[in-house]
Image (cartoon, rainbow, N blue to C red):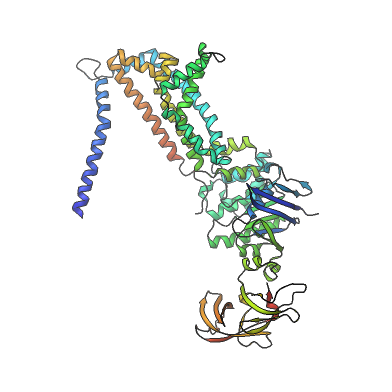
Amino acid sequence: MAAAMKRSSFWSWLWIILGTLYFLLPLISTFDFSLRARKGILSFQAYLNVFKDPSFWATIRFSLIIALFTILVSIILVVPTAYWIRLRLPKLRSLVEFISMLPFVVPAIVLVFGLIRVFSGAPFFLTSTYLGTYALLVAAYVVLALPFVFRSIDTGLAAIDVRSLTEAAQSLGAGWGTILFKIIFPNLRVAILSSTFLTLATVIGEYTIASFLVGIKAFGPYMSLIGQNKTYESSSIAIISFLLTWLLMGMIQLFNRGNANAGSLAGGR
Amino acid sequence: MAFLKLTDVSKFFGSTAAVKDVNLDIEKGEFISFLGPSGCGKTTTLRMIAGFEFPNSGTITLDGEEITHKNPSQRNVGMVFQSYALFPNLTIGQNIGFGLEVRKLSKAEIAKKVEEMLTLVHLEKHMDKYPYQLSGGQQQRIALARALAINPRVLLLDEPLSALDAKIRVELRLEIRRIQQAMNITTVYVTHDQEEALLLSDRVVVMSEGHVEQVGTPASIYNYPATEFVAQFVGQLNLLPVSEVNLADSTCMLAGNRVHFEPAPGRETGPAGRLAIRPEELQIGAGEGAANRLQGRVESVLFLGAVVRLRIHINGITLTADLFNERQLILPRAGDEIIVNFSQHSCWLI
């Protein structure tokens, strides 16, 4: 029995080590390569070059602003929809869930061509102005982020007794605005934050839609351009991008842990 | 005029009638319980009073004002839910003050009322805690305080004790009654627990399949059930087949014995029927002056603490008898031959 346990432990560790190597080796190699911008010595020169490049800051700022609007529109759109479906239209849930999965099925290139084709001509002409194009970009990202946002919010709603909380608030005299902003939104804080960080991570690194709509104004196309022209800097940007994503994921974990108790609904103890 | 009045109220879900032609008058300060099995329409009726469901027909009047189709937020009705439904993001104090904040009361007024309500439910020290930091019983007290804080015209409670353990239930139901009487608030209480309904209520409304079977005081519901459903649902009941019913002298044949039952003037029945008798009405022994005596054999003896339950076989029928336990009580044993006696007024024909 002890021998069997030792054998199973050996295989577990082997798979963990192999898995870790599979994920970490390319990353370590990229990091190592990014440090070799100066001949013969290891340095952060490539990182300094990136940080000195005004385009880096301009593109990251642009993508962050677009991400912010995407998050706002997504939350305003998805939270009331998911809430209403849970409260009044539970039969529609499977349909909305299916629709929210469509961005996984429709490739981004198809989506962006569709958007350009529909919104470039009459009566919209959105792509003929900067503001229109940015609005189109935000709209495209809202669609792209829909699976993450809807899933997070719906899971958050499943964790609270939406119907009883709503009815309790109604019986106390609250209208829909009070219920949404004082009860539902605060109790979905963790879910909203999760979807916010996931959307941010998606928008920051997105390439296809951004390159067709705004070109190198966005961070994704900028990274691609650097990758084509500057060898070491492209590796350093890849590492920065990874760190940014990990930071966002870490923040999701942090908020989830911090609110694990506060988010739980009343229960017999 | 009744303080809360339901007139011909019906509610359909699709083609299914959840509530059918319910008529009910509730007086101010009265404690009314809706009692019935699952799916009998008691919660739907309560939800229509609260405004969470609207009736398909009929009217609901509260304090002279018709509220049939008013939104819940416009009714000034307090509601306590089975799941407590405290807002997890708010402290206990904020939960109780929520309805007052919605009514735009000043901070000082809210603080005073919150303190008053916390004192009422004996949870003064928990104002700054969050709901998850309290036990189930404490959470339900807070839910009660929150519902009462808005000075509702009616307090509605939807199986508020169902999620709690037995000991807390017993404590809290007395607490609910104490608070209701102290505030003299009209209360409608939904439960499937007959003991709860009988103990708490001024009147009990027994419901079945969407309609009202009987409305009455707990004693009248228990002692004079109007229908077979009420007789069977509230308390334990022996329903025994009888023949040769004679309404003129109120007698019938039960297991080969002629027994006397309580006269029911105006009642029409055939030569056969069923005799109803509560287990606690049966006595062991010849019983001096008893109208009815039956001889039978003890099938089983169940010791339940305060009560001892006997199953007795009498000429092909089995009946249940409950004896109050006493320290000196000599219990019969299974297989013993015994005599059971009962008065004429303890049994009736159904």
Q: Is residue A248 left or right of residue B145?
A: left
Specify the farthest residue to the right.
B1
Is B60 located above or below residue A175 in the figure?
A: below
Specify the farthest residue to the top.
A128
Specify the farthest residue to the front.
B271
Q: Residue B306 location, x and y as percent?
A: 56, 75
Q: Which residue does the image show at 70% across and 46% down from the upper left?
A: B56
Q: Quadrant of the N terminus of chain A?
A: bottom left
Closer-to-camera residue (B4/B39): B39
Question: Is residue B115 something that shows in the picture?
Answer: no
Q: Which residue does the image show at 47% across and 30% down from the upper left?
A: A146
Closer-to-camera residue (A256/B347): B347
Closer-to-camera residue (A247/A78): A78
Question: Is residue B130 something that shows in the picture?
Answer: yes
Task: Please tell me in which quadrant of the rendered image residue B224 appears.
Answer: bottom right
Task: Please tell me in which quadrant of the rendered image residue B327 appears.
Answer: bottom right
Q: Residue A144 location, x and y as percent?
A: 45, 26
Q: Residue B104 location, x and y as percent?
A: 68, 38
Q: Is residue B16 left or right of residue A48?
A: right
Q: In this figure, what is the number of numbered marks?
A: 0
Closer-to-camera residue (B25/A53): B25
Q: Is residue A150 left or right of residue B153?
A: left
Is A63 located above or below residue A2 in the figure?
A: above
Is A128 located above or below residue A74 in the figure?
A: above
